[in-house]
Image: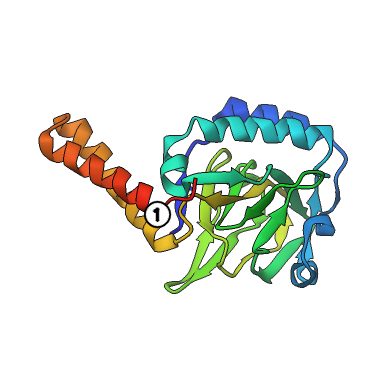
Amino acid sequence: MMLRIPGLLDASGVAVIRGIIDSAEWTDGNVTSGRQAAQAKRNMQLPEKSAAARQAGDLIMAALEKNGRFFSGALPLKIYPPLFNRYEGGMTFGTHIDNSVRFVPGTPVRVRTDLSATVFLTDPADYDGGELIVEDTYGEHTVKLAAGDMVLYSATSRHNVTPVTRGARISSFFWIQSMVRDERARTMLFDLDAAIQSLRGRTGDSDELITLTGLYHNLLRRWADA
């Protein structure tokens, strides 16, 4: 399942994060790459232990905590601390698949990468290229969202970022370990939750809606590792 989270950050939130990271010192993006990805990756990245990355990452995490659509779609158990990258001057990231497990530096924490996330921090009109291309059984999906929007997609997907030929594409990226490992189960739970919320908004609670809500939580209880 690919899921758009519109307006994770509002314009002021994007501006605050850009104010933190734009003047920071960037380094070669391959510091977080696996062997295969390093052969395809050409971009810049904020060092993940830098003060700017931690401060901006905390703001992303705070926004995630308040976003119901993110929680419903990801059912997060662990979130890898947000990272930040920059593409310009023809930089690109060729086709790759993300590492299955990420180790948070300086901690014993391991994150199984069930979902990949990108938060766009640049207005699409300010750069050419830089599309995120995600492949699944239905073909290729091109993603280039408004600043402040986020996309969630399966970390098992082949994906790439096309060359940026004008301007700079700046974004945050990270991975999520879901309470529900199975992608089909997560998708069914998301659809069921969305239907329940829509019905509740139209009709209020009823015996049938209470039954559906109970079904949702019993399925989540059956499938979740928490």
Determine which residue is flagged by label 1: 223
Would you call the spot at circle 1 few (<14 residues within 10 Å), some (14-19), or many (20 or more)? some
In this view, the residue in front, 186 or 145, is 186
Q: Quadrant of residue 53?
A: top right
Q: Is residue 16 left or right of residue 157?
A: right
Residue at the extreme left of the image, as rendered:
207
Residue 9 visible at all: no
- Residue 102 sits in quarter: bottom right
Q: Is residue 38 above or below residue 15?
A: below
Q: In the displayed structure, does residue 40 sit left or right of residue 114?
A: right
At 45% across and 52% down in the image, what residue appears? 3
Query: Quick one: 167 or 31, which is closer to the camera?
Result: 31
Residue 74 on image: x %, y %:
48, 48
Image x and y of residue 26, in percent:
85, 45
What scheme was used to colour the molecule? rainbow
x 78%, y 61%: residue: 33
Report the side of 13 relative to 105 (left or right): left
Secondary structure under badge 1?
Answer: helix
Q: Can you see residue 49?
A: yes
Q: Residue at x 80, y 67 (%)?
A: 38
Indicate the position of residue 14 as horizontal and vertical percent values.
63, 32
Report the residue at 55% width, 67% height from top. 157
Q: Position of residue 82 (x, y in %)?
A: 68, 43
Quadrant including the N terminus: bottom left
Residue type at mark 1: give it.
Trp
How many numbered circles does the render carry?
A: 1
Which residue is nearer to you in this view: 76 or 68?
A: 76
